[in-house]
Image (cartoon, rainbow, N blue to C red):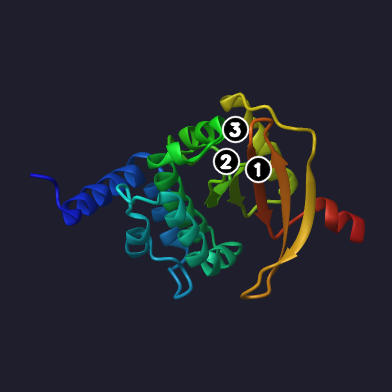
């Protein structure tokens, strides 16, 4: 007899909890809980994971697009919240890795394979995944400056995954559409079809130019 959808969801939830515990994310969240309580603006890790529990979803790409829309306010809040950076990273890393075949670029799949192993290697957290026919898109969020984040990306993600980056790299100052927070985003890309964004409230280069 085929497994019912409820059983599939329970199994998927169990795998997600195991992933949180074994990847080091649970330890980081416990440390944050000792410093700061969860706010009403924070994403709810277990409740909101239900939105992503779609291993057997026939249109997982559309599901990820829906997820990106639903989590927009959480992404904006996460610019100022380390806890939500880890919450978003946990959901996106697990969901992306479980469904990595929907990403057309092998570079994207390699990035997800590296992210699923552990979290404590850097200050970069996944906050958005968009599989596309022409070019996949991955977005990280961080609390450190963009300059420091780029160096961490190169040292802890690009080099271990042996990714080849194109020479094009640019930064934009942006404003979040919901809470109107000013932030900065740098854009990178691999030679084999993955666009990478890193966003932060801080850019040393920008502020040094303003002084």
x and y, in percent, of residue 149 in the image: 67, 44
Q: Is residue 35 visible?
A: yes
Q: Are marks 3 and 1 in contact (CB under 8 Å)?
A: no
Q: State left or right for residue 32 relative to residue 191.
A: left
The quadrant the N terminus occupies is top left
Residue topped by disc 3: 156
Residue topped by disc 1: 195
x and y, in percent, of residue 131 in the image: 53, 46
Q: State left or right for residue 171 relative to residue 25.
A: right
Q: Nearer the viewer, mark 3 or mark 1?
A: 1
Q: Secondary structure at mark 3?
A: helix
Mark 3 crowdedness (10 Å alpha carbons): few <14, some 14-19, many ≥20: some
The residue drawn where x is 58% and y is 46% is: 124
Mark 2 crowdedness (10 Å alpha carbons): few <14, some 14-19, many ≥20: some
x and y, in percent, of residue 175 in the image: 72, 68
Q: Nearer the viewer, mark 2 or mark 1?
A: 1
The residue drawn where x is 63% and y is 36% is: 193
Q: CA distance from mark 3 to mark 1?
A: 17 Å
Residue topped by disc 2: 122
The residue drawn where x is 44% and y is 75% is: 40
Q: Is residue 211 visible?
A: no
Q: State left or right for residue 172 relative to residue 124.
A: right
Name the residue nearer the viewer: 203 or 176: 176
Name the residue nearer the viewer: 25 or 131: 131
Q: Are marks 2 and 3 in contact (CB under 8 Å)?
A: yes
Q: Secondary structure at mark 1?
A: strand
Among the two numbered marks 2 and 3 on one chain, the one whose residue lies closer to the N terminus: 2
């Amino acid at each position: 007899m085929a497994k019912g959808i409820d059983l599939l969801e329970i199994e998927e939830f169990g795998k997600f909890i195991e992933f949180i515990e074994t990847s080091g994310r649970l330890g980081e969240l416990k440390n944050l809980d000792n410093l700061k309580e969860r706010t009403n603006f924070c994403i709810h890790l277990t409740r909101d994971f239900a939105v992503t529990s779609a291993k057997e979803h026939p249109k997982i790409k559309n599901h990820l697009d829906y997820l990106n829309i639903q989590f927009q306010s959480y992404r904006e809040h996460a610019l100022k919240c380390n806890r939500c950076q880890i919450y978003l990273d946990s959901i996106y890393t697990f969901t992306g890795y479980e469904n990595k075949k929907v990403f057309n670029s092998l570079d994207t799949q390699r990035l997800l394979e590296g992210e699923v192993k552990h979290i404590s290697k850097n200050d970069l957290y996944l906050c958005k995944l968009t599989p596309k026919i022409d070019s996949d898109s991955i977005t990280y969020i961080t609390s450190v400056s963009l300059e420091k984040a780029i160096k961490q990306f190169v040292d802890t993600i690009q080099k271990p995954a042996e990714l080849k980056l194109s020479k094009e790299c640019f930064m934009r100052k942006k404003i979040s559409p919901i809470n109107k927070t000013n932030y900065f985003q740098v854009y990178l890309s691999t030679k084999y079809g993955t666009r990478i964004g890193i966003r932060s409230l801080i850019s040393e280069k920008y502020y040094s130019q303003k002084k």
